[in-house]
Image (spheres, helix red, strand yellow):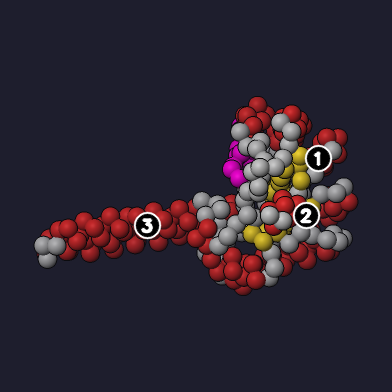
Amino acid sequence: MNKRGALSVLGFLAGSFFLFVAAVSHWLFHHRGHRRLAKTLLAAGAAADGLFLYSFLVPNFPLTGRVFYSGRTDGNRLALSFDDGPRPPYTGQILDVLKKEGATATFFVLGENARRFPDLVKRIEVEGHRIANHGDDHSIMMFAGGGEALAQLDAADQAFRDAGVNDPATLFRAPHGWLSPAAHRAISRRGYRVTGWSKGIWDTASPGVEAIVSRTDELLRPGRILLLHDGWSGPGEEDRSQTVAALSEIIRNARARGLKFVTVEQMMEEEAAF
C-alpha cells in the first residue's frame, strides 16, 4: 500500500467511527433525553478517534509496540542515520563526506535499491557503517499483517546477502515510521528491534542547505537519532544534493558541542548497560 492509500483508509476508518458515535449520541440526546450521556459519549468518541489517528500517524508512539528513538541523554553519543538508499550519486557522496569527517552512520536500506546498486550497498559496510532494514519497496505498513511485514523484511535481507553484505544489523525502521501492531509483533519476534528517530528534519522537501543545518541544530543533543535521506523508492529521480551539502556542517556542529557519532546499535548497547 502506498502513502496516499494508507491515509485514505485511515481517514475512512476514523470518519466512519466518529459518524457512528455522533449518530448514537444524537439518538440518545433527542429520542431518549439522555443529554449528559450523549455529550459524554460524543466527547469520549472524539478522544478515542484522536488517539486512534495519533497512534498511527505519529512515529515512535508506543501503542503499536516499543520503538527505540532516543538513547541516554547524560552522555555524549549521537546517532546519524540515512533512509531510502542507496542511490547514486548521493549515497556515494555522503560516504565520501563521512570518510572525510571520520563519522559513522547507520543506513536503513531498501531491498529494491540494494538489488539495483549492490556495489554501493557493499561499500557502506566496507567503510565501517551499519546496514539496517527499511523494508523492500517502501510499502506503507500502517495496516500490514504479520506475514506481509515479514515478506518485506525477508526480501530486503535477501537483497543484502546477494550484495555481499556480511553482517546487517537486526534493526528495522518502517517507512514513514508507520507500523501496525501485527507487523510490529512479527518483526520483533523475528529478533529485530524496531527503530525510529528523535525528530524529523524533512530534508526530502529540499528546503535549502541552511534550513537543513538549522533544523538539525536543535537535535544535536546526547542520545538523539538524526534522520536524513540518501535515496528514494521507485524508478524516478529525486534530489538529495542539499543533504550532501549540509552534512559536513552538521557533523562539525555536533563535534563543537562535544558529541561523538556512533551507530544506532552502539547507542542501544549503551542504554542496555545501565
* Frontmost residue, 167 versus 83: 167
Residue reaching furthest to the top: 210
Q: Which residue is mark 3?
A: 49
Residue drawn 64% across the image and 43% down it: 73
| Residue 159 found in image quarter | bottom right
Disc nearest the viewer among 2 and 1? 1
The structure residue drawn at horizontal position 76% and vertical position 49%, both measured from the top left corner, is 263
Q: Which mark is residue 224?
A: none
Confirm whether the magenta stretch covers residue 203: yes
- Is residue 19 shown above or below 84? below
For label 2, count other residues whose C-alpha is less than 10 Å away and answer few (under 14), some (14-19) or many (20+): many
- Residue 168 shows in this picture: yes
Q: Position of residue 232 (x, y in %)?
A: 68, 48
Q: With 109 as the anchor, is 144 left or right in this view?
A: left
Q: How many marks?
A: 3
Q: Is residue 237 visible?
A: no
Chain part drawn in magenta? 198-208
- Relative to 183, residue 249 above or below: above
Q: Label 3: how many residues lie within 10 Å, few (<14), some (14-19) or many (20+)?
A: some
Q: Quadrant of residue 173?
A: bottom right
The verdict on residue 187 being magenta is no
Q: Which residue was labeled with disc 1?
A: 103
Mark 1 falls on what kind of element? loop
Q: Secondary structure at mark 3?
A: helix
In the image, what residue occupies the spot 50% across and 60% down?
63
Gap in angstroms between the C-alphas marked 1 and 3: 43 Å
Neighbor class of circle 1 (other Cα within 10 Å; few <14, some 14-19, many 20+) is some
Horizontal placement of 100 versus 151: left or right? right
Say which amino acid is labelled 2: Ile
Q: Quadrant of the N terminus?
A: bottom right
Q: Which residue is mark 2?
A: 131
Label 2 sits on a secondary structure element that is strand
